[in-house]
Amino acid sequence: MRCRRGGSTCSSDERSVMEQERRSRVIESSLLANSQEKERTEATKPFTIPKRLVWKAWRLVRANRGAAGVDGESLDEFERDLKNNLYRLWNRMSSGSYFPPPVREVLIPKKSGGERPLGIPTVSDRVAQMVAKLVLEPHLEPHFHEDSYGYRPKKSAHQAIAVTRERCWWHDWVLEFDIRGLFDNIDHRLLMKAVRHHTTCKWLLLYIERWLTAPVQQADGTRRQREKGTPQGGIVSPLLANLFLHYTFDRWMTKQFPALPFCRYADDGLVHCRSLDQALYVKERLARRLKQCGLEMHPGKTRIVYCKDFNRKGEYEHIQFDFLGYTFGPRRSCGKNGRIVTRFTPAIARSAAKALRQEVRSWRLQVKSDKSLEDLSRRFNPVIAGWVNYYSRFYASAFHAVARHINRAIAKWAMGKFKKLKRHQVRALKWVERVAQQRPNLFAHWHAGYRSAAR
């Protein structure tokens, strides 16, 4: 339903967003009003935490969305009494009386099999952690290594992939490693030592220690005390994990092997080496270093890879590796003079492509004949756009298989939607290709040129 107001047109969804924004501005004004009174109140607290910082933290948490914690309170429910909830949180944090509630544990499946525990804090605790992150992160960022890319502002997975691709051209060997259960095994004593090295803020130190030791509540309601690790899923956890690995790996590498470039994205890392013997030596030294810090290399995800291409033609067991959803390996590509040569370059990983095809199948487009093509575009195009933007950045032709799978799923929808296409698969595939040519902006992969539906 649409309405006209002052000559402009707005939808019901837009009105609800506008209402929410107006309500937020009213609450913000109320929270931040009477600045002189606020300063007198804050002066009586042992810790100085600006109310405006709590408000900023809330806006970031709301934008990130997320599930409810152990108290079952959703973001919408928290927002219904936003003014009192934020004031209560600010008052407790400023007074030193804030104690984080238990973290709800959820087991999520891993791509390699098994399950990974994910910790979900309450909405209020997520806001508190965001406050701490907003204060701590600016102090840590200038000290982090330039080749650490995970969970950092102005750093991206694409940057890590690009620099790795270039370094593989100049170094014959890569040590690929993964740290087993990083978030579950971080040593609290060593982590707090690193935090104290960078800040003397008393409330930050107090609450970080409390977050590290907050209990975990399992699905059956039982609670488990935590003596090491930081919950994967907490707002401040990735920042703390990066700080821990900054001293465990990044700084150690620059001191012990200053000539060897490396790239780390959270707990996944690569070290570029000149020879096999050098790679073996680095692997042995790194395993000892991680053990000293209470961590362990994942034996199934750590290996030494030979970067084979048209100049490097040796025969070795491992000639490819996966990193950030891409597989680096020898691929045929066009050289500068137009000749086809073999280069060591990244393309969408087989496991990633399989996961995307499974996601498309889960949409069950073939039973959505009551929906129009525009409905499907509004529902699924944002997801497809994310895939195209991420996986077609390098060796874009490898994404064709996923794009064809999407187009064939649309063809199955068309077979159920239009009588003239029913039980005519070839005709439906041609119909998809024709519509993709005529209306390429409906779906991101059509706009990027992936319009073929044939195998």
Image (spheres, helix red, strand yellow):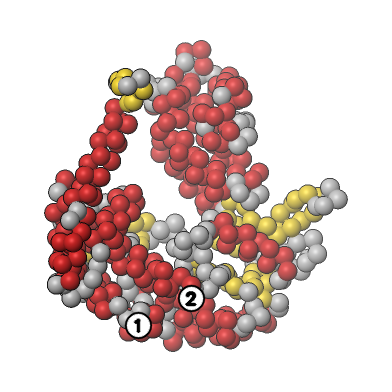
Amino acid under disc 1: Arg
Amino acid under disc 2: His
Q: Is residue 289 above or below residue 361?
A: below
Q: Which residue is mark 1?
A: 196
* Element class at badge 1: helix
**Coordinates of residue 153 in the picture (x, y in percent):** 46, 61
**Coordinates of residue 119 in the picture (x, y in percent):** 29, 62
In the rendered view, does 49 fall on the left or right side of 354?
left
In the rendered view, does 7 fall on the left or right side of 127?
right
Which residue is at a point 62% across and 31% down the rendered structure image?
452
**Coordinates of residue 326 in the picture (x, y in percent):** 57, 56
Q: Quadrant of the N terminus?
A: top left
- Of 412 and 44, which appears nearest the observer? 44
**Coordinates of residue 154 in the picture (x, y in percent):** 50, 60
Which residue is at a point 48% across and 48% down the rendered structure image?
355
| CA distance for labels 1 and 2 | 14 Å
Q: Which residue is mark 2?
A: 143
Instruction: Please identify the quarter of the rendering in which residue 261 is found.
Output: bottom right
Which residue is at a point 34% across and 68% down the rendered structure image?
135
Whichever of callouts 1 and 2 sits on the residue coming sooner in the sequence is 2
* Element class at badge 2: helix
Could one spot residue 130 in this view of the protein?
yes
Instruction: Please identify the quarter of the rendering in which residue 19 is found.
Output: top left
Dot label at residue 240: none
- Of 85 and 34, which appears nearest the observer? 34
